[in-house]
Image (tube, grey):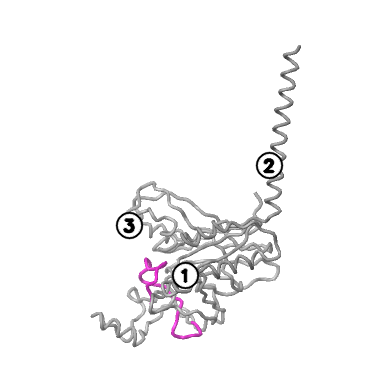
């Protein structure tokens, strides 16, 4: 089978806590923007759905959207679990770090080497909860620190004090440090991309605005990302992409604070579909698009085919039917001839 979009390379990230791995995609120059393939596995009785998510490189939201009927804490042994391992790349420049907040996922585009194709690596995220939203901005990495101390801002200390859980002015590096073992500071210095001592919060809105990764993911990313790497934090609950002349729509739940912007409002999606199909003849399935938006699964859903392929399929079908009819007629003539003899 021809794979025009990518070559898939899996590499292990050794960790004492988990066997999780990241996925590195090598992009072709075809212009396709859908990578990966949806997977299926069987649940093990010794794992929660969150264990499965972490082991395969997903967060809580990723797994619950596509496995709503699988018990989070007690999956049945041998129960089929879908792995949402196919992604539409965000509509953003393919450079540095692109963080899509409603998707709760990071895309890292390493610097492109001469003569080599562009690559992308993707990781799940924990993001800011309502009232402490992660800001949308374009910035860069200005500081990297292993084993960081945490200096809780006064606003967070007041919140903890009000809850009867006062924080010290400095939380030293170690297992109780919410920043985990690695942290990278953004140009807006109030925000960090860091690890966590509560990995099950990845794929949830749980932070005070900072970006959390699994411990093994931040360790791998920290080793690859250099200072001054651009960071683009975006808000794209709906993504449109193309693979093999098919248009795909990937929908994620929009943030609660964006309800007025996105609920019952398809303007942004229609604009994306029109833009990507511009100057080309596509047969669009608007009902499939509407269904994907109203029941977001986080999976790319086919919503349009290049018209030349559709027409060719119709021609092939008509030709096949014509051949079948001709064969039947020929057999009937032979039968009539035999009977007359």
Q: Are marks 3 and 1 in contact (CB under 8 Å)?
A: no
Residue 117 position in % (x across, y down): 66, 66
Q: Is residue 29 above or below residue 98?
A: above
Q: Is residue 292 above or below residue 192?
A: above
Residue 115 position in % (x across, y down): 71, 68
Q: Residue beneath label 2, please? A: 317
**Residue 43 badge:** none
Residue at (67%, 51%) from the top-left corner?
A: 310
**Range of the magenta residues?**
186-207
Q: Earlier in the sequence, mark 2 or mark 1?
A: 1
Residue closest to the eye, 307 or 69:
307
Q: Earlier in the sequence, mark 2 or mark 3?
A: 3
Magenta-colored stretch includes residue 192: yes
Spatial CA distance of label 3 from label 1 is: 24 Å
The image quarter in which residue 191 lies: bottom left
Magenta-colored stretch includes residue 163: no
Q: Residue beneath label 3, please? A: 73
The image quarter in which residue 278 lies: bottom right
**Quarter the C terminus occupies:** top right
Residue 237 position in % (x across, y down): 50, 68
Q: Earlier in the sequence, mark 3 or mark 1?
A: 3
The image quarter in which residue 276 lies: bottom right
Q: Residue beneath label 1, please? A: 102
């Amino acid at each position: 089978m021809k794979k025009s979009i990518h070559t898939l390379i899996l590499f292990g990230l050794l960790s004492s806590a988990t066997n999780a791995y990241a996925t590195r995609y090598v992009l072709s120059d075809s212009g396709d923007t859908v990578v990966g393939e949806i997977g299926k596995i069987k649940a093990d009785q010794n794992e929660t759905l969150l264990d499965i998510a972490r082991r395969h490189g997903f967060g809580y939201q990723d797994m619950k959207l596509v496995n709503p009927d699988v018990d989070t804490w007690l999956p049945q042994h041998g129960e089929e679990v879908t792995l949402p391992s196919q992604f539409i790349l965000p509509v953003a420049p393919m450079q540095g770090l692109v963080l899509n907040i409603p998707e709760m996922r990071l895309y890292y585009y390493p610097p492109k080497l001469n003569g080599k194709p562009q690559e992308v690596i993707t990781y799940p995220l924990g993001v800011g909860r309502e009232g402490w939203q992660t800001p949308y901005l374009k910035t860069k990495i200005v500081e990297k620190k292993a084993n960081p101390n945490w200096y809780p801002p006064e606003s967070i200390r007041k919140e903890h004090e009000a809850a009867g859980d006062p924080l010290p002015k400095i939380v030293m590096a170690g297992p109780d440090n919410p920043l985990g073992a690695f942290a990278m500071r953004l140009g807006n210095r109030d925000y960090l991309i860091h690890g966590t001592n509560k990995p099950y919060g990845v794929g949830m809105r749980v932070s005070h605005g900072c970006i959390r990764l699994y411990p093994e993911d931040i360790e791998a990313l920290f080793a690859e990302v250099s200072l001054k790497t651009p960071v683009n934090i975006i808000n794209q609950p709906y993504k449109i992409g193309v693979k093999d002349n098919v248009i795909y729509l990937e929908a994620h739940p929009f943030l609660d604070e964006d309800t007025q912007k996105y609920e019952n409002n398809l303007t942004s999606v229609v604009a994306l579909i029109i833009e990507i199909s511009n100057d080309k003849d596509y047969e669009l399935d608007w009902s499939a698009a509407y269904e994907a938006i109203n029941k977001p699964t986080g999976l790319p859903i086919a919503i349009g085919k290049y018209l030349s392929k559709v027409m060719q399929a119709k021609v092939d079908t008509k030709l096949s039917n014509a051949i079948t009819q001709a064969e039947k007629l020929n057999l009937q003539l032979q039968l009539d001839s035999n009977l007359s003899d």
